[in-house]
Each structure stands twice: as structure tokens, then as C-alpha cells.
Image (cartoon, grey):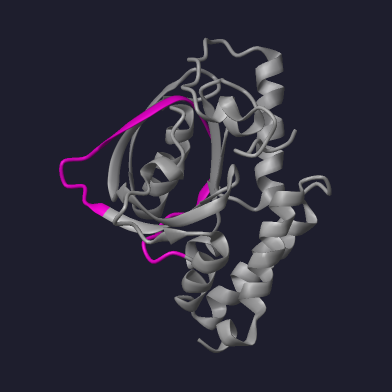
Amino acid sequence: MDVVTLHSPNPDVLLNPTIEVSFPLSQQTLQFISEMQALLLKLKGVGLAAPQVGSPQNIFVYSISAEQNRLRKDANRVVPMTVLVNASYSPTIDAKLVYDWEACFSVTDHTGKVPRYSKIRYQAATPEGTPIIGIAEGFEARVLQHEIDHLQGILIIHRLTKDCLQGHPDDMLLLRYQEFDPAQKLIAKELLIERIKNTAADQHTELAMLNKALKILTDPVTRKT
């Protein structure tokens, strides 16, 4: 299972809405979900949607660790590995628009501060078909919006408007890392090293991006800021 990017031979799966999944899930779909979970753990990311691995199914997995929370000002909840099926969301009445850093496994040459709702109500189902209605805030709300966007064929490049801070990851990572304290930089370095170790050798663009990020993070100028 490999990550599909905009530079992949067939990136159309990233740009089209997904297909609603019927229950009960087939054994093949359950195995597919298991493989998605394993890949997300290897990549040390917070979310992965089915289109990102070449499937048009309305499924995504996400997980937020204590370490990943340390890298965000508005992260307030550790989330174990979770699978959501046929998910959608809407902002709550008291939601505000917040700009914060986002990257995407499928968008390797652009990043920035993406506007997202600070609080959302989401609906989905578990792999067993049990309906879920929940409220998410802060970073978790951002993660859910990012992944549900994937299910609608929407990427961060579609959310980044002219007034957003944005650009090539090399430039944006330098700015982001300058916002980190020493402990956050150490966590970010460890996460990058793990992602590099678990990225396939033939994923040249992804590896190049990760190694550049690690170089920026460990540059003496970045370390001193």
C-alpha cells in the first residue's frame, strides 16, 4: 500500500468525491482498513483517507498521540486509532475560523496555514455500522476536517486562499520550526526520522521532502531561534 500524491501516475482519486460504503463491510474492506492503520502508524501521521491510498471508499483513519499534541497550541485530546466511515461535518454555532499549519502526504510541494473551523459537529459510522455523532474542537477538529475533505476530493491547496501564509515546504517549514520551543523541535525531529525510516525507497519525492525538512530542523540557524 503506497500513498497517492498529485505527482502520482493516476492522481484523479484524490480529486473526486468518494463512494458511500455499505454495511456490513466485506472482509476485503476490513483488511484494507487494517492496512491503512498500519501505514498511518509507520508514517507517524495523524490521519489517512482512503483516496490517499488509491481507493474511492468513504473511509479514513486517524490517531493523535501525546507527542503530536505537544506540537500544537490547541491540541487537547489524545485519540487512539479510530476508523470513521461515511463521515461528514458542519461547524457549530460558536465555531471560529482559525489559521494553522497543515501538511498533507498527498501534496508534497505546497503547505501553509489553512483556515479551519475551531469546533465542528461530525457524523459517521464505525466499521461495525454503528452511527456516531460527536463534537470536536481544536486540533482534533482540524484533523477531522482535513480527512473529511479528502473524502470530498478537496485538498489543502483548495483551502489555501490568497490571504493565507503559504508556499513551498522548504520555506514554510523554516517559519514553522521557528515557532517551536526546544522540546517541540526534538519531538518533530524524532517524528521525521521515523517517517523517513518507514517511507518506501521508491517514494523519491516524499523522501526528498522529509530529508529537507529534517535538514531545516537541524540547521544551526533554526535551532537557535
Q: Residue 221's spot in the image, x, y percent?
A: 58, 86
Above or below, 177 against 89 in this view is below
Above or below, 170 against 129 in this view is below
Identify the residue at image location x=71%, y=64%: 211
Quarter residue 35 falls in = top right
The residue closer to the viewer here, 6 or 135, is 6
Q: Examine the structure image and report whether residue 67 is included in the region drawn in magenta.
A: no
Q: Specify whether 185 is left or right of 132.
A: right
Residue lying farthest left? 93
Above or below, 60 against 136 in this view is above
Identify the residue at image location x=55%, y=82%: 182
Q: Is residue 81 visible?
A: no
| Highlighted range, magenta | 72-97
Quarter residue 208 falls in = bottom right
Number of labels in the image equals: 0
Q: Residue 67's spot in the image, x, y percent?
A: 56, 64
Q: Is residue 178 visible?
A: yes
Q: Residue 2's spot in the image, x, y percent?
A: 73, 36
Identify the residue at image location x=52%, y=68%: 171
Q: Specify whether 195 is left or right of 85.
A: right
Residue lying farthest right? 201
Q: Residue 21's spot in the image, x, y percent?
A: 52, 14
Q: Specify whether 162 is left or right of 14.
A: left
